[in-house]
Image: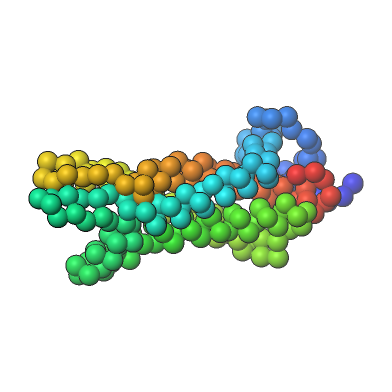
Amino acid sequence: MSLDRWVVCEQCDSVYTRRPLRPGEVADCARCGHHLYRHHRFDLERLLALTLATAIVFVMANVYPVVALNAQGAYNAATIWGAVIATWESGVAPVAFISALLVFFFPLSQICLFAYVLLGLRRGRRPAEFRQAMHALSLMQPWSMAEVFMLGILVAIVKLHGVMTVIPGIGLWSFAILTLLLAALTSYDLQDLWDIAEDVEAGRPA
């Protein structure tokens, strides 16, 4: 029997033979109860489609205005990057830097890394930098905070509504959808991708 058919528990080092699972099933260690592996919740095609949709909405959220403000005839449209730049120019550089990381660079990096890994696996091979990409995804998952930024936008809109006319823009709706898509993308168990990579290397269908 080949080595890729064995599963070793990370907690107690118990060794098991990997067996096929039905949808929804999870394999746990009989000795300590640690999670070993589970049935893949998504196939590669569906996860690739989710990644592509997230990338498209990410571009829309960053290109189109989030809100338009109308105060006594003075009209001004604000984008996410415009807000970050305005924060930087107002002298609060640390806040601008952190905002840029959390709402732009981290989500963009996650989307690109998912696309890199999934496209490689879809071609039937493990990408050259697979381990590094997976490690980076694991590190960035806790820092995906688009929903926090979305909540801040909504609070700001409510506060400004009594002072001036606030018109939600395409960027706001795109960012709301982006928040949901990123939540779905980052909720995917990365261990499943490791398992799929092992299946691809062993010549088993992913």
Q: What percent of the width, then of the height, locates residue 51?
A: 57, 49
The image quadrant of residue 128 is bottom right
Between 161 and 92, the residue placed more toward the observer is 161
Q: What percent of the width, then of the height, locates residue 42?
A: 65, 39
Count all numbered tags in the image, as a single digit.
Answer: 0
Q: What percent of the width, then of the height, locates residue 127?
A: 70, 61
Check the image and report above or below for 126 versus 45.
Answer: below
Q: How is the image coloured?
A: rainbow
Residue at 64% x, 41% y: name it. Answer: 46
In the picture, the quarter occupied by the C terminus is: top right
Residue at 52% x, 53% y: name it. Answer: 55
Q: What percent of the width, then of the height, locates residue 124?
A: 78, 54
Task: Indicate left or right for 69 with 82 as reference.
Answer: left
Between 196 and 25, the residue placed more toward the observer is 196
Residue at 65% x, 29% y: name it. Answer: 24
Task: Indicate left or right for 87 with 73 as reference.
Answer: right
Residue farthest right in this picture: 1
Check the image and report above or below for 62 versus 35.
Answer: below
Can residue 148 be seen by looking at this rendering?
no
Residue at 25% x, 68% y: name it. Answer: 88
Can residue 110 be seen by looking at this rendering?
yes
